[in-house]
Amino acid sequence: MDVEDPQKSTEKSLNPNTEDDLEEGEIVAGGDDDSALKKSDSLPYQPHPLENRWTFWFDNPSAKSKQSAWGSSLRSIFTFSTVEEFWSVYNNIHHPSKLAGGADFHCFKYKIEPKWEDPVCANGGRWTITLTRGKSDTFWLNTLLAMIGEQFDHGDEICGAVVNVRPKQEKIAIWTKNASNEAAQLSIGKQWKEFLDYNDTVGFIVHDDAKKDRGAKNRYTI
Ligand code: MGP
């Protein structure tokens, strides 16, 4: 019996014309185009599972000024494990350019909290890109797609990603698990820049350094 590879089927349902151009697992923007889904109306509905389950987290900016401890207003808002669930959330939330200054929006692997204190993050660090206010939406979406579509050779090293919306800038960071694993960090940073077509220098700060000094220096740059 001919059973269609679920991965190929994911690619087709999201990108009916481009399946030959996609890497394994790759998801591209365009989740609100349902023309491909219409084509397969006659097939039973089959959600397309992601390799990992992910959780979106949000930190409430209005509470931030009053909070005594960082993270006290951090909340998990939705956990998803299929392509369809991802788009259903993504298409119904504000993107970074529409969020208030001070907001932090995270997408982390299920059960990893987006905090230095989380045991999986504790020995890690983060690659960060900085963008002018209002300019991060596409970079953020492409970061999410590369991450949940498992496009990184060292994807197991990734905890998640965060966008920090600030009054004059937006920062996107990918958090990783083992800062001392230089080869894995460099691979993630290089691939991220390629996926985003981002040409400026990007720096990696170790969480332990950031804890000690708000102006911590980059451990790696690419
Ligand atoms: P930030 O939110 O990463 O950057 O960290 P922001 O707000 O853009 O400010 P910047 O000017 O330092 O870039 C801001 C501060 O929040 C840090 O210096 C910490 O005091 C605190 N903080 C940030 N994070 C990610 C954590 C965390 O994971 N745990 C704890 N305890 N504090 C954190």
Image: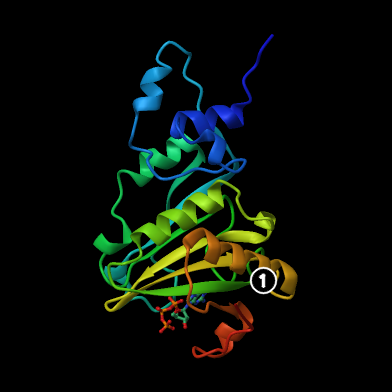
Tell me the quadrant of the picture where the N terminus can be found.
top right
The x, y position of residue 116, in whole percent, is 57, 72
Q: At 25% across and 67% down in the image, what residue appears?
A: 100
Residue 126 in sight in this render: yes
In the image, is 72 to the left or to the right of 127?
left
Q: Nearer the viewer, residue 214 or 197?
A: 197
Q: Is residue 78 above or below residue 48?
A: below
Q: At 66% across and 12% down in the image, what residue appears?
A: 2
Q: Residues within 10 Å of mark 1 (few under 14, many from 20)?
A: some
The x, y position of residue 97, in whole percent, is 27, 63
The x, y position of residue 168, in whole percent, is 28, 79
Q: Is residue 31 above or below residue 103?
A: above
Q: At 41% across and 61% down in the image, what residue appears?
A: 139
Q: Nearer the viewer, residue 149 or 86?
A: 149
Tell me the quadrant of the picture where the C terminus can be found.
bottom right
The x, y position of residue 126, in whole percent, is 57, 72
Q: Is residue 96 above or below residue 66?
A: above
Figure coloring: rainbow
Residue 118 in sight in this render: no
Tell me the residue that label 1 is attached to. Answer: 186
Whether the residue under disc 1 has CB within 8 Å of ligand 1: no
Q: At 61% across and 67% down in the image, what residue appears?
A: 190
In the image, is 220 to the left or to the right of 182?
left
Q: Secondary structure at mark 1?
A: helix
Q: Name the amino acid type tagged 1.
A: Leu
